[in-house]
Image: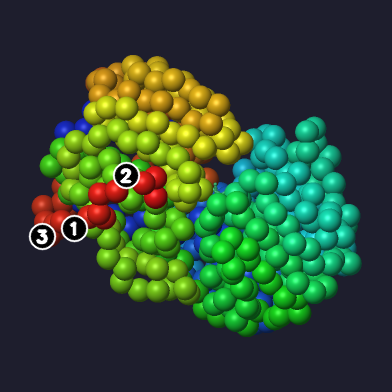
Amino acid sequence: MHSKNNIIRVKKAKRFGGEVSVPGDKSISHRAVILASISNGRCRIDGFLPSEDCLSTLGAMRALGVQIDVLGENDFGSDELMIHGRGLNLTEPKSDIDCGNSGTTMRLLSGILAGQQFSSRLIGDESLSTRPMERIVSPLGAMGCKISTEGENGCAPLSINGGGLKGINYEMPVPSAQVKSALLLAGLYAEGRTSVVEPLRTRDHTEKMLDFFQVRTDRNDNEIGIESGQMLESRDFVVPGDISSAAFWLVAASSFPNSQLMVKNVGLNPTRNGILKILVRMGAYVSESVETNSGGEETGNVTVQGGKLKGIEISGDIVPNIIDEIPIIAVAAALADGKTIIKDAAELRVKESDRISAVAENLSKMGADLQETSDGMVINGGNQLQGTELKSFGDHRIAMAFAVAGLFASGQTIITDAECVSISYPNFEEHLIRMTSATSKASEHPIPVITSFPESNSSN
Ligand code: S3P
């Protein structure tokens, strides 16, 4: 496999496996930079993901007057940072803040900017400028912030004239960790108590990290509350590996007969590890061991032994937990025996691309048998996939999911516009080459005992 001129070319793999440490978690990296910036002192962040999305957050915090020093670099960027926290009050930016492709940057930052005594304007790239922002504009407006969208249909650019916030109780119409996080952050600046009710449980990194920084939030079922006037105590933080990046390798190994894979130091937060449960329900041999608890985030190793997967139904509570993994799960389903039904995932239509139609188009082009539905798809797995030329739709997770599909397809698979992988996984190709090469360390790490989650019929 190689990429040239932003193209990834993949041939059918003869082997797959080994040991890999994936780069830092994207969601946690954003939050580490934002929370450290508004803490009361210096915070060292290790394992930061220097991908384009997280660099957008880093650039934004610098534009808001936060000093961020680079202490160390790995092969693909700066992963050790010293953040000089400013406390809750930031400095008015000199120009528009560019959030690039990152919805997390735009939505979380809006929560902080809503509490500032100055005006700011947030812009994004073409994709981000078509994503729904009313979902934060409406509740932040209800808290008293003067916030509006300048784009069509409630899209960016966003103008924010902060200050004068009052706590509200908000029932989110869609499950979204970004909206929940924006409101909890705004709650730090609001008078009284702010609370958010989520219709389904979403990732809880913000709550965990606030707790780590000594800010109290409380949870009562699906309601999370925060009292204003709390100061974040500066702390050093280690970002675990990103399970959403690991998912590409976990699916490849699970679907590849006799492969053995170990992913090390990966985040295993229960609101994010649904991919492991899905693979077990599909018949994979998966073992998970939590080794540390870094800043409140469970971190450990995952081992997988390859075999033949089977189709399942995916719907309900687990969907927010695996929302970013559904493109690669759909690839697993196309490789599996039998029918997979994916439901309740309409949110995929408003991600970096319309991921339902992008996945359906690419899998169909490869010869898979599937039907797109309004909130998911039905995949009849087991057809031999054919290599062909596929678009990434400018979406990192689509590019990587179909690079993995190419490992199982006859002939050659070409992904165009693949430079977008650097949004979340700058060294994706290097890892793919390593895990498909003869020198991969798979045989040095035999998996002695295979344990797995109990077989269950529930969608959880
Ligand atoms: C994220 C939450 C999810 C996810 C995104 C990252 C976060 O989005 O899809 O990639 O870091 O909070 P929503 O909150 O829109 O569901």
Residue under label 1, please give it. Answer: 451
Q: Secondary structure at mark 3?
A: loop
> Which residue type does callout 2 highlight?
Asn
Q: Is mark 3 within 8 Å of ligand 1?
A: no
Q: Is residue 66 left or right of residue 52?
A: right
Structural crowding at the residue carrying mark 2, measured as other residues with C-alpha within 10 Å and reported as few (<14), some (14–19) or many (≥20)? few
Between the residue at mark 3 and the residue at mark 1, the CA separation in whole angstroms equals 10 Å
- Cβ atoms at labels 3 and 1 below 8 Å apart: no
> Front-most of 380 and 291?
380
The image shows a total of numbered marks equal to 3
Between the residue at mark 2 and the residue at mark 1, the CA separation in whole angstroms equals 18 Å
Location of residue 398 with respect to 114 vertically, above or below: above
Image x and y of residue 376, in percent: 49, 31
User: If you read the primary sequence from the N terminus, does the residue marked by circle 2 or circle 3 appear first?
Assistant: 3
Image x and y of residue 401, in percent: 39, 36
Residue 430 visible in image: no
User: If you read the primary sequence from the N terminus, does the residue marked by circle 2 or circle 1 appear first?
Assistant: 1
Q: Is residue 405 left or right of residue 373?
A: left
Q: Which-is-in-front pick, marks 3 and 1?
A: 1
Location of residue 182 with respect to 151 vertically, above or below: below
Q: Which circle marks residue 354 in the picture?
A: none
Residue 124 visible in image: yes
Q: Which circle marks residue 457 in the picture?
A: 2
Q: Is residue 111 left or right of residue 23?
A: right
Q: Secondary structure at mark 2?
A: loop
Q: Which-is-in-front pick, marks 2 and 1?
A: 2
> Which residue type does callout 1 highlight?
Thr
Q: Which circle marks residue 448 in the picture?
A: 3
Q: Secondary structure at mark 1?
A: loop
> Front-most of 252 and 78?
252
